[in-house]
């Protein structure tokens, strides 16, 4: 139980907003439960605004839950030991364009509790892995979208994490870029990493995930294995939910 | 502890590097143009008081440039990082929120100190060319400007955590800067209003104590009657340091509970 | 833990600041009934903490106002008489109110008004205000010395301006103007001599003394004074004036 990469129990989050005297409450997540197994690729799929990014932010401790618990390898999600074992790639990562990959990775590496004598080697390893070795001294302002995404993946892999959390990793990429990311995810699984990623592209999820959770209006409606008719099933689940909850 | 200090140092170093790469230091060349221009102008308009006028314009410019760059950089940096989610990448790592804020604060402080040293050196060089003989008061003026701007940096960080707009944060800082210089006159205003029958003097006195008092750090206005490094001067610097630490602590508490 | 640290720091700061703030060397407030609030100098000084700079700007404005070169001087009619530069006193008042420690301005303004423009009443009014201001500043500065620290003696370079001496200079100048008004030129020049060669005495005092010597036909003394002015001045126009005066005086001495 304690060795499970990610355990989410009864996680809820409501956003409160005040605007010109009016207060609105938006329930972003409503008591979701989830357990990841070691060495699996798990995907969270849903429409825009379903709560995918909220779930990821809660897992990473960027926002505070109203109720519920999150554990990463048995430790509270906000603890340093959890964070050392986690690598994160946000949706459309931003890097200062005046820096080079080496400079960026040196900075991120220095914050990741990587021993100083091992940092240089790790940087070279991730650059090689993401095919950015030849661009290591090139300024980021000349990088394409796909290259920036690869750099994002490189920084996520710096500390050789056991759990990778990727928020819409295929977002904004061309077909070649999508294939590259998909291949990376499969290779990482072969290296015994556990991957948790969110997406709204069901066709991509089908090709890479071991399990899929359907998230809609803050609730997990179903957890299933991907198959060729996943897209139809997804639409059916959502329309059934809408019909029953009018 | 050692790891935390190392992370603070890395974040501070990255802050300085970021600003250097953005070429924010080019503003220093604008400063040099201004003081050289003033040197030429005032030697024509006021030849017998040239040194005084150049010193006053130079030190006022140093203070204004240091204030503007520090406020602008602090506000923009924090807000931008939250908008483009760079802060997510930092906080997803084993980095505590207070470490991030402290690192950013120290980075901007180091950069500001460098700018002040550079501008003071340029001013001192111009004064020496114009016949001035070295006096330590110029170091005292730079130190007092630095401590003033330290308070501004801490407030800028705090405002950028409260506000979502860089314009409103910057305006708030400017308002605070003015109010901090104006604070002594609040008491006089209170007395005048009391004479007119409006009894808000106690409230003005409370405001006077709460807002930062920049006039005690205005060494550039009374350097010729006060020795640099006098007890009074050192206490003023201690006041500024303590005040900015308190605001930094408030910023840390705000950031701890902030939803990103 | 953080909240406790904040609380302790805040309490320390509060106690510390109450003690500190009231002891700071504060200038007299700009918001008095006499001060014209609309001037840009007030804005610069009170909102941006640049009183000295504001005073310099107004002082340069006063020099520009007073400068006759290439311009018709500003004048007004008072009781059928033409009064040149009627606003000059207000300019000088602004300067000394913005920066009460602008010692040259305290001395130069009354000389310009009392000697150059022969408006003794205005000059004495300005001097009286200057004397009051200097007394106030001296009290404020003395009151703000927390302790005579050894650090001050060890590391300090340059002396604290002695405002008592400035006050005596102003009183002397007032005496000079009164003597001149009553025609006691000899007495006036003796008083002026006591301050003309002091450190930071403005050039105007020396020019005034040189002109008095000339009026009294003490050409040797006048020549010595103009030579001294010529050697020490940084102002081209004063250098030119002193050079011309030296030529004239040499002729006058030769003829005598």
Image (cartoon, coloured by chain):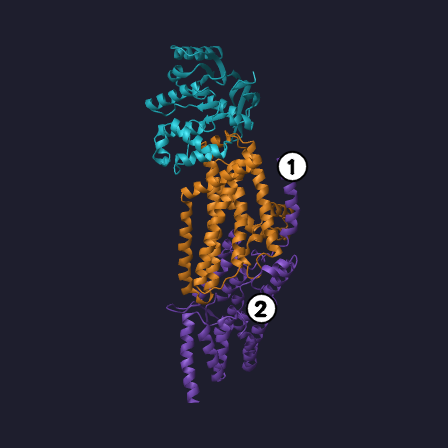
Chain colours: A cyan, B orange, C purple
Chain ID of residue with mark 2 = C
Point 38% across, 30% down: residue: A148
Above or below A234: residue B228: below
Q: Is residue A93 left or right of residue C143?
A: left
Q: Which residue is mark 2?
A: C166
| Camera-side mark, 2 or 1 | 1
Indicate the secondary structure of the residue bearing disc 2. helix
Q: Is residue C20 left or right of residue A195?
A: right
Task: Pick whichever of labels 2 and 1 is earlier in the sequence.
Answer: 1
Say if mark 2 contacts mark 1, CB within 8 Å: no
Q: In x, y percent, where is residue B154?
A: 54, 42
Looking at this view, name the residue that lies furthest to the front.
A117
Q: In x, y percent, where is residue A230?
A: 40, 11
Above or below C173: residue C215: below
Is residue B7 visible in the rendered image? The answer is: yes
- Among the 4 quarters of the image, the one containing residue B129: bottom left
Local crowd at mark 1 within 10 Å, few (<14), some, or many (≥20)? few
Res. C4 mark = 1
Point 54% across, 79% down: residue: C189
């Amino acid at each position: 139980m304690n060795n499970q990469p990610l355990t989410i129990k009864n996680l809820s989050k409501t956003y409160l907003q005040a605007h010109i005297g009016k207060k609105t409450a938006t329930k972003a997540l409503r008591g979701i439960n989830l357990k990841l197994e070691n060495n699996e690729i798990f995907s969270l799929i849903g429409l825009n605004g379903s709560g995918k990014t909220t779930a990821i932010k809660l897992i990473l401790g960027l926002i505070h839950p109203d109720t519920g618990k999150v554990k990463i390898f048995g430790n509270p999600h906000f603890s340093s030991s959890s964070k050392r074992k986690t690598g994160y790639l946000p949706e459309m990562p931003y890097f200062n364009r005046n820096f080079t990959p080496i400079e960026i990775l040196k900075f991120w590496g220095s914050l990741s509790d990587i021993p100083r004598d091992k940092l240089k080697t790790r940087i070279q390893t991730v650059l090689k892995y993401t095919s950015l070795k030849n661009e290591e001294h090139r300024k980021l302002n000349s990088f394409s979208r796909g290259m920036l995404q690869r750099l994002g993946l490189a920084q996520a892999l710096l500390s050789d994490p056991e759990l990778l959390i990727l928020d819409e990793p295929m977002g904004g990429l061309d077909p070649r870029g999508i294939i590259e990311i998909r291949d990376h995810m499969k290779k990482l699984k072969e290296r015994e990493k556990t991957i948790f990623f969110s997406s709204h592209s069901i066709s991509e999820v089908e090709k890479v995930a071991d399990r899929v959770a359907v998230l809609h209006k803050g609730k997990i409606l179903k957890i299933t294995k991907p198959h060729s008719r996943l897209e139809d099933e997804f639409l059916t689940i959502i329309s059934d939910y809408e019909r029953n909850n009018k | 502890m050692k790891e935390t200090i190392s992370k603070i140092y890395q974040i501070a170093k990255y802050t300085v590097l970021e600003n250097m790469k953005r070429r924010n230091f080019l503003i220093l060349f604008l400063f040099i143009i201004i003081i050289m221009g003033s040197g030429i102008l005032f030697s024509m308009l006021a030849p017998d008081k040239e040194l005084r006028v150049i010193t006053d314009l130079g030190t006022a410019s140093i203070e204004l440039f240091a204030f503007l760059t520090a406020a602008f950089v602090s506000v923009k940096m924090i807000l931008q990082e939250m908008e483009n989610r760079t802060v997510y990448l930092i906080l997803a790592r084993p980095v505590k929120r207070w470490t991030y804020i402290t690192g950013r604060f120290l980075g901007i402080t180091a950069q500001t100190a460098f700018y002040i040293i550079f501008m003071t050196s340029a001013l001192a060089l111009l004064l020496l060319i114009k016949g001035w003989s070295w006096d330590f008061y110029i170091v005292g003026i730079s130190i007092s400007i630095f401590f003033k701007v330290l308070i501004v940096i801490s407030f800028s960080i705090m405002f950028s955590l409260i506000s979502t707009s860089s314009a409103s944060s910057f305006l708030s800082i400017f308002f605070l800067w003015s109010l901090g210089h104006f604070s002594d006159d609040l008491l006089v205003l209170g007395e005048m209003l009391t004479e007119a029958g409006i009894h808000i003097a106690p409230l003005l006195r409370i405001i006077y104590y709460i807002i930062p008092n920049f006039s005690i750090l205005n060494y550039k206005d009374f350097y010729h009657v006060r020795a640099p490094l006098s007890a009074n001067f050192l206490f003023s610097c201690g006041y500024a340091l303590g005040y900015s630490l308190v605001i930094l602590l408030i910023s840390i508490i705000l950031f701890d509970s902030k939803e990103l | 833990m953080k909240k406790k640290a904040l609380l302790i720091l805040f309490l320390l700061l509060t106690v510390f600041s109450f003690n500190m703030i009231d002891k700071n060397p504060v200038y007299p407030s700009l918001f008095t009934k006499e001060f014209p609030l609309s001037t840009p100098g007030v804005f610069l000084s009170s909102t941006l903490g640049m009183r000295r700079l504001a005073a310099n700007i107004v002082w340069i404005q006063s020099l520009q106002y007073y400068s006759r070169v290439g311009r018709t001087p500003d004048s007004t009619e008072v009781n059928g008489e033409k009064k040149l530069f009627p606003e000059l006193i207000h300019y000088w008042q602004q300067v000394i109110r913005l920066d009460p420690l602008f010692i040259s301005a305290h001395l130069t303004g009354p000389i310009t008004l009392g000697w150059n423009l022969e408006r003794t009443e205005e000059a004495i009014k300005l001097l009286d205000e200057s004397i009051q201001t200097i007394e106030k500043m001296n009290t404020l500065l003395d009151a703000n010395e927390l302790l005579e620290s050894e650090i001050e003696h060890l590391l300090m370079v340059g002396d604290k301006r002695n405002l008592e001496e400035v006050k005596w200079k102003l009183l002397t100048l007032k005496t000079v103007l009164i003597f001149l008004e009553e025609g006691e030129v000899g007495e006036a020049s003796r008083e002026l001599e006591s301050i003309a060669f002091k450190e930071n005495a403005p050039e105007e005092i020396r020019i005034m003394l040189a002109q008095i010597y000339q009026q009294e036909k003490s050409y040797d003394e006048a020549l010595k004074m103009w030579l001294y002015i010529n050697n020490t001045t940084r102002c081209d126009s004063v250098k030119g004036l002193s050079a011309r005066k030296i030529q004239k005086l040499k002729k006058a001495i030769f003829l005598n």
